Image: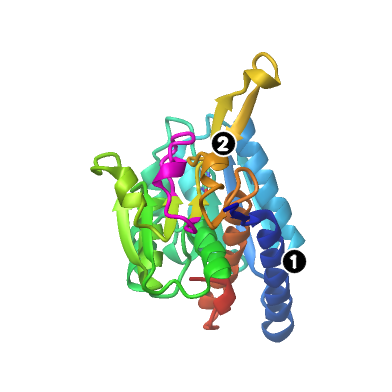
């Protein structure tokens, strides 16, 4: 069998198109333009690229984009004061502080300072709790994107065996919550799991989110299973020349795609979904702030 390639880039493009339609409708019917504020502290080049992409895509779907670039040595109190100001602004519906922040700033204080109703990363304990019990609100972007791809490929997930590899607060745990909400039978595997290949062999769905390059092997996979690879690992690629790198996921793509029914590539799978879901969360929080039911196709 050769697996169908789940094209996250194309799906994300379609999702941004739907977001743009919802934004236009919010403006026309309610006079609301969703706004996303992004804060970046310092000059980390990778963070700059992420933040610029977020700001550009926010504008492209017709939302207001507010970008705050703070100096590397900005006092923590100033960042907290900015968050407080944004918490109180009516035209800002989502706030994101790009992580990591410099060492003199306490990441937990930043997350706790965000108004949970504007926490579009879904980092706050209140929002994580809402995801777990199925209340409306923002949903962590990478798990939401993975869920959308799974639903699009498989339709109803009810009763399917899903194995999530990785138990991080950002991906593994919320991913398991979302799969459970869709009535999958969910197993969370991690570094202490006994006989991981045997656990994976039962899975109709595997979500790999461990950050270990090409760990999931062909002979772990039930024929026809759907494999979502969340990993983005930079590994040396001497075949491309000295000092060159390439990106691989947590799944041995070549081997696994000979057995799986469908698989997300890296790059071009889950990655492009993440920013699109950030925009989706901003529409959701803008709706909730104004007593409007959020569009069901933008959330879990
Ligand atoms: N840094 C890398 N990814 C992310 C993300 O999804 N959100 C925030 N706030 N910072 C990040």
Q: Nearer the viewer's eye, disc 1 or disc 2? A: 2
Residue 72 appears in the figure: yes
Indicate left or right for 22 with 171 as reference: right
Q: Nearer the viewer, residue 244 or 263?
A: 263
Residue extent of the magenta highlight: 208-226
Label annotation for residue 248? 2
Indicate left or right for 144 with 54 as reference: left
Q: Is residue 284 above or below residue 213?
A: below
Q: Is mark 2 on a helix, strand or loop?
A: strand
Q: Which of 48 and 1 is in front in this view?
A: 1
Q: Position of residue 220 (x, y in %)?
A: 39, 45
Q: Position of residue 11 (x, y in %)?
A: 66, 62
Label annotation for residue 62? 1
Q: Does the residue labelled 2 lie within 8 Å of ligand 1?
A: no
Q: What element carries label 1?
A: loop
Q: Badge 2 local density, few (<14 within 10 Å), some, or many (20+)? A: many
Q: Badge 1 local density, few (<14 within 10 Å), some, or many (20+)? A: some
Query: Tag 2 or tag 1, which sits nearer the N-term?
Result: 1
Q: Is mark 1 within 8 Å of ligand 1?
A: no
Indicate left or right for 100 with 247 as reference: left
Q: Position of residue 7 (x, y in %)?
A: 66, 56
Q: Is residue 236 above or below residue 230?
A: above
Q: Which residue is drawn at 30% across and 57% down?
A: 187
> Extreme bottom residue here?
29
Q: Which residue is drawn at 51% across and 39% down?
A: 252
Q: Which residue is drawn at 44% across and 75% down?
A: 136
Residue 43 appears in the figure: no
Is residue 185 covered in magenta? no
Q: Which of 285 and 68 is in front in this view?
A: 285
């Amino acid at each position: 069998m050769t697996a169908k390639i789940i094209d996250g880039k194309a799906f994300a493009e379609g999702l941004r198109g739907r977001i743009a339609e919802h934004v236009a409708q919010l403006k026309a019917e309610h006079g609301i333009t969703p706004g996303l504020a992004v804060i970046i502290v310092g000059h980390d080049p990778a963070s700059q690229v992420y933040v610029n992409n977020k700001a550009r895509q926010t504008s492209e779907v017709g939302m207001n984009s507010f970008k705050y670039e703070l100096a590397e040595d900005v006092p923590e109190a100033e960042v907290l004061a900015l968050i407080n100001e944004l918490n109180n602004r009516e035209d800002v519906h989502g706030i994101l502080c790009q992580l990591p922040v410099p060492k003199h700033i306490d990441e937990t204080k930043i997350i706790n300072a965000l108004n949970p109703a504007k926490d579009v990363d879904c980092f706050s304990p209140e929002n994580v709790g809402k995801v777990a019990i199925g209340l409306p609100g923002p949903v962590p972007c990478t798990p939401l994107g993975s869920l959308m791809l799974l639903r699009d490929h498989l339709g109803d997930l009810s009763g399917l065996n899903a194995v999530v590899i990785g138990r991080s607060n950002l991906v593994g745990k919320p991913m398991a919550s979302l799969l459970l909400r869709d009535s999958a039978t969910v197993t969370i595997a991690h570094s202490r799991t006994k006989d991981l290949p045997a656990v994976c062999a039962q899975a109709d769905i595997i979500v790999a989110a461990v950050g270990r390059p090409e760990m999931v092997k062909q002979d772990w996979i039930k024929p026809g299973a759907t494999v979502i690879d969340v990993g983005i690992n930079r590994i040396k690629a001497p075949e491309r020349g000295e000092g060159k790198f390439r990106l691989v996921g947590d799944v041995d793509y070549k081997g696994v795609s000979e057995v799986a029914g469908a698989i997300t590539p890296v790059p071009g799978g889950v990655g492009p979904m993440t920013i699109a879901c950030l925009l989706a969360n901003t529409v959701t929080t803008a709706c909730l702030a104004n007593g409007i039911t959020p569009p069901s196709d933008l959330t879990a």
